[in-house]
Amino acid sequence: MQQKKKHIKIYQNKFWQTKRFWIIAILATADVLVFIFPSYLKNVINTEIIALNLGISPAQLSQASAVYGYVSLVVFFFGSIIADKISLKWLTITGLVSFGITGAWYGSVGLTAGGAIIFDVENNIAILNPIGQSNRYTQILIIYVIWAIAKIIFWAPLWKLLSQQGKPEENGILNGVHGSLNGLIGTIFVGLGFIIFTILTPIFVNNNNTSSLAFSLMCYLFCLLIFIDATLLIFFIKEKKGEVISKDFNIKEVGKVLKNYKIYLLSLLVMGVYMYQQGLSVLIPFMNSAILISSSVTFIGGLLRTYLFRLIFSAPSGKIADKSGKYIKFLVIGCIICSFLMMVIIFLPGFKVEGFANQSAGMKLLIQIIVYSFFLCMGAICWGLVTNRWATIYEIGINHKQYATSVGLISVIAFSPDAWFWQLNSLFLEKYKVETSIAGVYNYQIAYQYSMILIVVGGIIGVISGFILMCKLKNAKIIK
């Protein structure tokens, strides 16, 4: 009898472990699908191509990203407050479905106001349709504002739901499994979407047809997956009622955090990391236009660095940082390496439009290999840095009562490039575009190089802040 009970218990544990795995997979899928539209799609597809299919200019698309960043920063803190007052499950579903509905609208924008694309028969190329461009741009701005609000509704509840799938001491493994599944699922979904887009584009864009329907169908696929995942959330995800983040929160702890100079230094260091994490998307169109690497090759690189590298490098980098216990130093070293690699990429083709095209075949190939390899290296390093960025908080002596407030303050500063970086990127794209021999077609090489210089400046600020922070911590230990 005792043996039978033991057998049943083992079977139940195995069943729960399997069930929990699929629950985490549903949450990871939601995480992937929410950020495909505003963030991850431009990590794998040239933003010039995305803008063309939306019927707006690259500068306007970058400005929409800046608006998304500004709204996100304004409403950032409300996410955690709302998550404590309303059902986590239904907040997550509401945010996810909001992305699905607006994602369908996003995919349809290029079909409105006269259509996004016209075909230049003489040069055998699709170009932007200026008729209705203002109307389409207004739609995109509204969509990005909705996305920013939906992200705040979705983000904090998602992570709280994830934390409820195990015991507090299992939080590390929950995040690890979630991150790995995010990378795997993202690779499959985005890869499938890109294949559909690539195969259908020549069918819908040619001498006889000028439609952005291939892009629309890719977006509709992602929306269908969102609604399927939302349905799975409704039926299979359960939440624990009555939980709060911290019963010890009070205004005095907020005051202590605001007065702590180490928080601001750490914020700048994490911002340096984030500059590379989100700024690498600029390299996709740069490699296409300045280094003449094909879009299919850059797509593979973008897919690797955005999803698969998260699966491969996150856990090992966490173990390496854990062994040393010096997370700040880990971030500083990573930012130094990324800054060096990015500077090499910036200067390799020179600051002359089409200067790369005048190089010998051997030199072109060498530059392409170096730039592409460095891009992949930075992608791997970034996931290692992202994995360890929040571990730095305990290193500067922040206690549990101040942890949530510290994360909030650091996030506002560190993720501010979502607003100001894309604002400046939009300015560069508009000011430094160079018209090619084809009317209505521009080369943005110089604009991308200025944006990459801005990324390096952010990285160096992070490195300097990290060095100051390490010196302060070292001196504090010596005094003790």
Image (cartoon, rainbow, N blue to C red):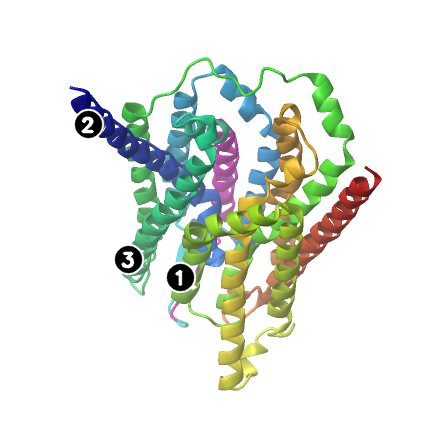
Q: Nearer the viewer, residue 352 or 15?
A: 15
- Where the C terminus falls, by quadrant? top right
Q: Nearer the viewer, residue 370 or 74?
A: 370
Mark 2 element type: helix
Q: Residue at x 48, y 35 (%)?
A: 147
Q: Nearer the viewer, residue 243 or 120?
A: 243
Residue 396 within the magenta-colored segment of the rendering: no
Q: Residue at x 56, y 83 (%)?
A: 358
Q: Nearer the viewer, residue 33 or 307?
A: 307
Q: For this view, does 156 lie left or right of residue 185? A: right
Q: Which residues are magenta?
A: 124-153
Whether residue 133 appears in this view of the structure is yes
Q: Which mark's residue is nearer the viewer, 3 or 2?
A: 2
Taken as a whole, is the magenta stretch helix, strand or loop? helix
Q: For this view, does 70 lie left or right of residue 226? A: right
Q: Name the residue beneath numbered marker 3.
A: 200
